[in-house]
Image: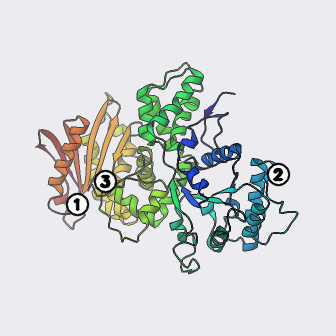
Amino acid sequence: MNKFFNTAGLCTPDKHYMVDPLKRLTDIENLINNELYFMVHAPRQSGKTTYLHALTQKLNWEGKHIAVTASFERAGFSTITMDKANETIIDSIYSASKQQLQEIFCPGNPEQKKYLDLKNYLQAWSESQEKPIVLFVDEIDALLDNVLISVLRQLRDGYQSRPKHFPSSIALVGLRDIRDYKAQVKEGRKSLGTASPFNIKSDSLVLNNFKKEEVFELLDQHTRATGQEFPVETKEEIFRLSNGQPWLTNALARQIVEKILKNDYSQKITLEIVTEAKNELILRRDTHLDCLIDKLNEDKVKKIVQAIINGDFVLFDRLDDTVSYVRDLGIVSQTSPLKFANPIYAEIIPRVMAFSFQDSLPEEIAQSKFVNQAGALDMEKLLKSFQVFYQRNSQAWLSRFEYKESAHHLLLMAFLQRIVNGGEIIREMAVGNGRLDMLVKFRKQEFALEIKIKRDNITIEEGKEQLSNYLDRLGLSEGYLVIFDPGKKKWEQKIYYKDITYNNKKIIMVGL
């Protein structure tokens, strides 16, 4: 059977093209050898489970430890009782061990003996073995409230008796660091006592995205297997679009090879095909992207996302974990300034936020109204039409829109998306940059737009300089500076459309 790019579940080397998972975290075996408890966290579909199973196999093959990866997800629902949670978790460990270990290394069968709790079960298992036990707990953050607290406290309680009477090393694996597990407990409860009931952990390791060379190697595996080459420029573009996010990387490659080219390995992979794959992924919104989008309704996420779109500065109390939360979800970059984690997220998140606008636009706002007989997009006509639409509708529309802080930007994006359908809108956003940069590509045309909210008297001068620099970077000689003025002026003062020259660039000023 030919290997393929996997986008669902555990990757295995006999079926899938895959980056060597063991190279993604290099310090973990030292922690295990030193009998430490620690965390591994990364966003969803980053390869955590694949990594854990590969490491489990390696440790068991080497023979110095007894290693098991078990998921606690089945105990992660709000109505579960403490007794049922312990029973479910113990059963998960036993079932996993039956699949991953020889019979002599497995813990006791819980159906044959009643164990008091998780600590009691792990203690009995450790005491029955000569080798130290290593337990990887996957989906630890699926547990809620008292169940989570109980599990963490049982692990902490057994810690001092390791390795003879308790697992010598335990790793908790999930989306977030243990410092944030207090968020899993219902608001108002004081049960945690301290910031963490698992204060025995020594390290928190982050499973990062694929590096560029790993993305290239992943794609080259397909070339070696089939002869179908990903040219260098397409590999560069796949890495740029995904920023090495494992699911996105595999999803783009799979979309190209299986969905667009229908496994016809004689066909050439081009940049146009990569763009087509990206657009199809965004429109299809697979589970990975839907899970990401679900988070947009959370206040913490909404606060950061709107600040990125607007380019606003965001001030946080030093104890505020909003930034770490959104970073741990994988929505924004690990670097500063904060921006969306990759260009695909930067496109799909504003699209989704603007969807209610776009879906409600009148039928007469259509591409055919703004494209001439030669197939060229008339950007002047488009923006002047938006000015009329905005003047007539903005007060009613913006007041009822969920994302009020970024509603001006999103309304313009919805308008553009409706008309540029079939083209491409590239958005560049970051917290604190004071603007939103957009490059609209339509057939062979390119239009640069800079969008700003007028905050004070220097906004326009600042916007001219920023747009001039953006045009230099794009190699364009003209662009559009769109200024939203939320002040209480008359429309006659806000609405204007004029050309100026700035730093030898033609800048079209669009007032709103």
Count residues near mark 2 (Cα–Cα under 10 Å), then give few for <14, some for 14-19, many for 20+: few
Q: Quadrant of the C terminus?
A: bottom left
Residue 64 point in image, percent of width and height: 69, 49
Three-letter amino acid code of the residue under disc 3: Phe
Quarter holding residue 10:
top right
The numbered mark at residue 22 is none
Asked whether 340 or 10 is in front, the reply is 10
SS for callout 1: loop
Three-letter amino acid code of the residue under disc 1: Asp
Q: Which residue is mark 2?
A: 104
Of label 1 and label 3, which has the lower sequence position? 3
Mark 3 or mark 2, whichever is nearer to me: 2
Count residues near mark 3 (Cα–Cα under 10 Å), then give few for <14, some for 14-19, many for 20+: some
Decide: is 298 above or below 226: below
The structure residue drawn at horizontal position 74% and vertical position 58%, both measured from the top left corner, is 93
Asked whether 60 or 24 is in front, the reply is 60
Residue at the outermost right position:
112
Left or right: residue 19 compared with residue 414: right
Residue 322 point in image, percent of width and height: 43, 65
Residue at the outermost top position:
266
Tell me the distance, in whole angstroms, between the alpha carbons under discs 3 and 2: 74 Å
Look at the numbered discs 3 and 2 and tell me whether their residues touch, using CB distance below 8 Å: no
Three-letter amino acid code of the residue under disc 2: Ile
The numbered mark at residue 389 is 3
Q: Which residue is mark 1?
A: 485
